[in-house]
Amino acid sequence: MNEMAKTVRSTCPYCGVGCQVDLIIKENHITRVEAPFDVAPNYGRLCTKGRYGMDYVSHPSRLTYPMIRKDLGAKPRKPVDISGFRRASWDEALDLAAEKLAGIARENGGDALGTFCSAKATNEDNYLFQKFIRGVFGTNNVDHCSRLCHAASVAGLQITLGSSAMSNSIAEMKDLEVLLVTGSNTSETHPVISTFMREAVVKNGAKLIVADPRQIEMTQFADYYLQHKAGTDVVLFQALAHVIVKEGLVDQDFLDNRVEGLDEYLPSLESYTPEYAEAICGVPAEQIRQAARLYGSAGAAAIYWGMGISQSVHGTDNAISLANLALLTGNIGRPGTGLNPLRGQNNVQGCSDSGGLPNVYPGYQLVSDPELRQKFEKYWGVELNPEPGLTTMEMVDAAEKGVIQGYYVMGENPMMSEPDLLHARHVMEELDFVLYQDIFMNETGEYADVILPAVSFAEKEGTFTNSDRRVQLIREAILPPGEARADWDIIQDLALRVEVELGKEGSVGFKFENPAQIWDEMAELTPPFQGITHERVEREDGVHWPCPKPDNPGTPYLFTESFPRGKGKLTPLEYRPSAELPDKEYPYILSTGRVLYHWHGGTMTRRSKLDDIYPEALVEIHPEDALNIKVASDDWVKLRSRRGEIEVKVLVTERSPQGLVFLPFHFAEAAANILTLDARDPQAKIPDYKVCAVAVEKR
Amino acid sequence: MAKDKTIQLTIDGKECRVPEGTTLLEAARSLDINIPVICLHEATTSEGLCRQCVVEVEGWGRLAPSCITPVEEGQVVLTESERVIRTRRTILEMLNASVDLSQSDVLQAQMERYEVDPNRFPGAKKREREILDDNPFYIRDYSQCILCWRCVQACADDMQYTYALAIGGRGHDSHITTFFDVPVPESTCVFCGNCVGVCPTNALQGKTEYLLEKGLQHNEIRARRRQERQDKRRSS
């Protein structure tokens, strides 16, 4: 029956857990997905997206040949669906793209380009992308969607520790003693990780604290559920720290040897009494005390968080408030402890690691550091720009001012994911040239001049790095549709043509024959990767970086001896309310987020059978609010903010607290980001997707 | 339990030294002796349900289920004695008489290994159940279910902690179901498919494969899904 089937080991393309999968392939289709039981990080477990959501790769709407906009040059450019494009050869499309991008760079400098690399593409794709942009165009304007998810976690952990990755491994989670989960609807956004959390609680007697405005599923397993009001995180965690200090639960040894800043920090805690916090957060003071005692007196306690912490105008402060807790109690640098931002995309960790950020080369080596820059200049054979580039939303700002004139977007959908979408879309209409490279048409592709068809994770080779810094392989399991090509292959071809246009032939080095060679070049330039090769990842099923030498086993948990910045830094914080609070006209808080069955902008899951079980957007409304608005489940409401309005179906549920409505952002027909506010965290530049004010009216 | 205590025993004439607490099955595997199993799975808890892993321990009246029996000092164990073989053959013959095993590669191989007589129990009644097709992801064909419990365990405390599955009925009518027998989408199921991943027969099967085996092409499966969605929208 199965004699025709073959099995190919790969890495799930959805979230940052990085589950290892066996793809069962028949007649060039993925017919079944299994999980190997003996391999980290998932040990045989999958979630619904991994097991049943891979059918998008064979969807008939895959892009199969290059295309060029029919009304090329028309201004303003209007969004058009696929019928607004004509088929082109690879040569014609790449030559046109090269000519246009090079033209913009020649006339206005490389900084007139804005480029988006991809948290869904491989490390190798992203390394090559930023090498192309930095080396050939001389700009650092390269960023990706992690700006919109964990930028604040990165900023907060850089300030306190000097490093931003998840500190501990997923594999050690089942042995946790105490865990604090906040701003993470783990069972829907990182479902397999949530099973290890529940295993720790149910089987091993771990104690769970959940702090979340919504009564998410994980609260059913919690010993303490702290239901704080949206946007009051800093107050809650400072109050926990207050109790820990007042009741003498700090780890004095750790403070003496590993931490600095205590003298400035302690006075800042004084006002954050549990009673003050209760008034602001709505969490009973006694609960705060008990949770603080539990976390503070644990032998080992770990913190896990998601977008609820980072996607905020005070996201950096939120992350710092968690780091402060870990530093006070010495809960970092040992198994079962740690500060763990759960990464969203399959390769959002790796995209950042590979230099997909405006201020750093691969391995977080600063572009502004002359010594590091010279290393890359020497290796690549070009002069590099010492100025850090623009972040995703700064690129929108620059495009609005006419400073940026061309976009190169690889495997991202900023026209769904940016806040205040109507504004972002308007800016897109004025650009001189947009190059779009993806596996499907999406809301961003509708603005393209040239479309380049890429291949999916199942049709190419390379590595993804998961949330716990584990570098894992993807392998070619099926043949790509039509003329689609791997991202790295497209980038290299385009780069060579742009080099010709700019008279820089052969200067930077684009002679790669396969992704393994690309990895080797990146590893040579990036000390924490130097012990890792594709061959080793294949042999060991995955390696945790930092791994500086071939005989180094890799690093499942970080900071055993010290922090990258030396000592951990306790940082005083001040509570700042959210940027837009409810008022008479817009009386509800809107929080946006994800549901189990869908993924981000929906480009993948809405082309999967996953869409059958959750086919339309539902806004969660608390029963009391539903009474006031006079709606029931399945009624339609209009959600209106100061930026725009959408219509959406209602789900009446106690999951969302009174006064807050929750809207998933996967659905283009009810795009949540039409409503959201482009208010940014001052340090991380991340927008607030969790708190803005809306009106809700029965339609 | 003292951690480092080593137990010495003999399995099929071979000397074996393993830590205390090791099961007879694990000890045999350390000697590369292949004991067949049905209900046991590395991801789920051994319950000793199917008894296919039984072995003969010298001096014991009953055969020992090796997956849950810890080793003891000086034991002499036979894993393929005449009595063991007869027992395994009978277990397979009884299963085969009541359940459709035709799509289970694992059980077909064991039936060949133990030379099973498919007509051993001519008067037995096969469990016949309608295929349950109530969600977009997997079908449930309990006429192929051998009640190994793995799916229930995977859904509960061995993998997923979702607790959507239960065992209903008694005796010959025992069967796997959801709590209160509701369709899967109305249960707590989150469609992780971890139950499908541990099913040793084809009682739980991905819907795509199920439809492919029925002869549908991928585009036909897609069209059918579209139709089902439209029907559902119209009826609601």
Image (cartoon, coloured by chain):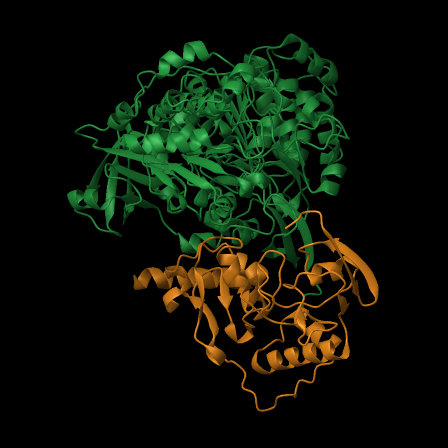
> At which x and y percent is residue A92?
63, 34
- For the view shown, which residue lies furthest in the bottom direction? B123
For residue A284, side relative to residue A159 (left or right): left
Res. A186 image quadrant: top left
Looking at this view, is A465 or A4 the one in front? A465
> At which x and y percent is residue A650?
27, 47
For residue A85, side relative to residue A678 (left or right): right
Where, quadrant-wise, is the C terminus of chain B in this rendering?
bottom left
Instruction: Please indicate, yes or no, whether residue A75 appears anywhere in the rendered image.
Output: no
Instruction: Please indicate, yes or no, whether residue A541 appears anywhere in the rendered image.
Output: yes
Res. B122 image quadrant: bottom right
For residue A655, side relative to residue B10 (left or right): left
> At which x and y percent is residue A37?
63, 52
Rendered view: A2 above or below A428: below
Q: Colour of chain B?
A: orange
Rendered view: A8 above or below A506: below
Looking at this view, is A77 or A187 the one in front? A187
Looking at this view, is A322 or A604 the one in front? A322
> At which x and y percent is residue A575?
33, 19
For residue B123, side relative to residue A293 (left or right): right
Q: Residue at x 46, y 16 (%)?
A: A570
Mark count: 0
Looking at this view, is A302 or A497 the one in front? A302
Q: Colour of chain A?
A: green
